[in-house]
Image: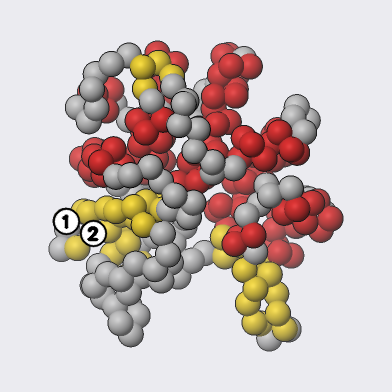
């Protein structure tokens, strides 16, 4: 089950106002699909994916003193910056994926294109979550480098069954056996946004760049038990 946070708790935790929250929505800084209406004992209430919304509010608060909300939309959107490139020296020191593992999965050139960067920043999030082993992160790299360019809504999903790890890129419902354990779920649009913010910081002030922020869906380490044996996350 997805880990959600109520609108009331979100406003209390982040200190933002109701008006600011919906201004961010109007500016498309927070996707409409993150506003989830659910019935409660007090009536209809709005909830959000906890980790995604907290990370997005943090990004907005970090950037709002330096860029306009319109410019921020371009940075935080999941639009595919296919022309983006960085060198090994610019990118690899800021992630936890070992170069020896990374270089086995793509042509060992000095310049990393968008697909390589997205695969690496996603594997980095998986490693920093503490939920995946090094060999499993290598498998994540293989998967992301072999699939098509991500579409809006795509997620990296990692599972274990009888001790064997496997992963996929998917949007919408995914049906998996009832005894399969979901290990990790990472929103690829959020990873693209994190990559854009990294590039902006890199161009603006190299000394300000430390490590790339991570986020993962907290709906991990749960047995997937639905009446049809599916994953509805």
CA–CA distance between discs 2 and 1?
5 Å
Residue 152 in the image: above or below residue 82: below
How crowded pointer 1 is (Cα within 10 Å; few <14, some 14-19, many 20+) is rated as few
Instruction: State the residue at coordinates (20%, 40%).
Output: 135
The residue that disc 1 covers is: 164
Residue 4 in the image: above or below residue 107: below
Q: Secondary structure at mark 1?
A: strand
Q: Is residue 166 left or right of residue 41?
A: left
Q: Secondary structure at mark 2?
A: strand
List x then y, in percent, for residue 188.
45, 46
List x then y, in percent, for residue 107.
23, 22
List x then y, in percent, for residue 76.
61, 40
Q: Is residue 98 left or right of residue 6?
A: left
The residue that disc 2 covers is: 160
**Decide: marks 2, 1 in contact (CB < 8 A)?**
yes
Instruction: State the residue at coordinates (71%, 33%).
Output: 71
Residue 65 in the image: above or below residue 223: above
Can residue 32 be seen from the camera position used here? yes
């Amino acid at each position: 089950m997805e880990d959600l946070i109520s609108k009331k708790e979100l406003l209390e935790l982040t200190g933002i106002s109701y008006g600011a929250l919906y201004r961010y929505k109007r500016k498309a800084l927070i996707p409409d699909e993150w506003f989830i209406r659910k019935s409660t004992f007090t009536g209809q209430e709005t909830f959000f994916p906890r980790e995604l919304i907290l990370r997005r509010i943090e990004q907005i608060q970090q950037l709002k003193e330096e860029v306009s909300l319109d410019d921020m939309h371009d940075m935080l959107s999941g639009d595919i910056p296919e022309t983006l490139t960085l060198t090994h020296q610019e990118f690899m020191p800021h992630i936890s994926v070992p170069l020896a593992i990374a270089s086995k999965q793509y042509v060992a050139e000095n310049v990393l294109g968008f697909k390589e960067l997205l695969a690496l920043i996603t594997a980095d999030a998986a490693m920093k979550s503490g939920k995946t082993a090094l060999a499993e992160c290598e498998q994540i790299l293989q998967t992301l480098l072999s699939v098509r360019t991500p579409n809006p809504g795509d997620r990296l999903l990692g599972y274990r069954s009888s001790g064997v790890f496997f992963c996929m890129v998917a949007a919408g419902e995914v049906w998996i056996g009832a005894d399969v354990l979901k290990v990790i779920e990472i929103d690829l649009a959020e990873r693209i946004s994190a990559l854009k913010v990294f590039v902006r910081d890199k161009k603006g002030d190299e000394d300000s760049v430390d490590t790339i922020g991570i986020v993962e869906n907290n709906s991990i380490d749960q047995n997937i038990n639905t009446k049809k044996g599916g994953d509805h996350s």
